[in-house]
Amino acid sequence: YGSPLSDIKHLAKHWETAFDWRKAEAQMNKLPNYRRKVQAKGFRDIDIHFLHKKSTNTNTIPLLFCHS
């Protein structure tokens, strides 16, 4: 299960040596962002912060990235 270790090591090395996080961060900061309280019965309310960019392609599938 999971990705091959060699692939993960290669990706980690790329992030460490070549990936420009500040450039990616600047691009993300240009996107519309929102805050919303999400309620689910039996659980406490959760405040979420998300970016939203609607595709110009009508055949796209919505994509949601989550982190904690």
Image (cartoon, rainbow, N blue to C red):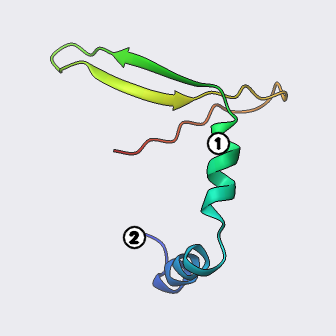
Residue at horizontal 57 percent and vertical 76 percent from the top = 11
Where, by quadrant of the figure, is residue 18 drawn?
bottom right
Q: Where is residue 1 in the image (x, y as percent from the top left)?
A: 39, 70
**Helix, strand or loop under label 1:** helix
Residue 24 vertical placement versus 16 (above, below):
above
Q: Residue at position x 50%, y 83% from top?
A: 9
Three-letter amino acid code at the position of disc 2? Tyr
Task: Give the distance between the C-alpha atoms of the residues marked 2 and 1, in whole angstroms.
Answer: 31 Å
Give the residue displayed 66% in from the left and 66% down from the top: 20
User: Could you say which is closer to the camera, residue 27 or residue 53?
Assistant: 27
Rendered image: mark on residue 1: 2
Pinpoint residue 37: horizontal percent, then vertical percent.
Answer: 35, 16
Name the mark on residue 3.
none
Does label 2 or label 1 sit earlier along the sequence? 2
Q: In this view, does 27 lie to the left or right of 44?
A: right
Q: What residue does disc 1 label? A: 28
Given residues 54 and 33, the one toward you in this image is: 33
* Residue at image location 62% in from the left, 27% down from the top: 52
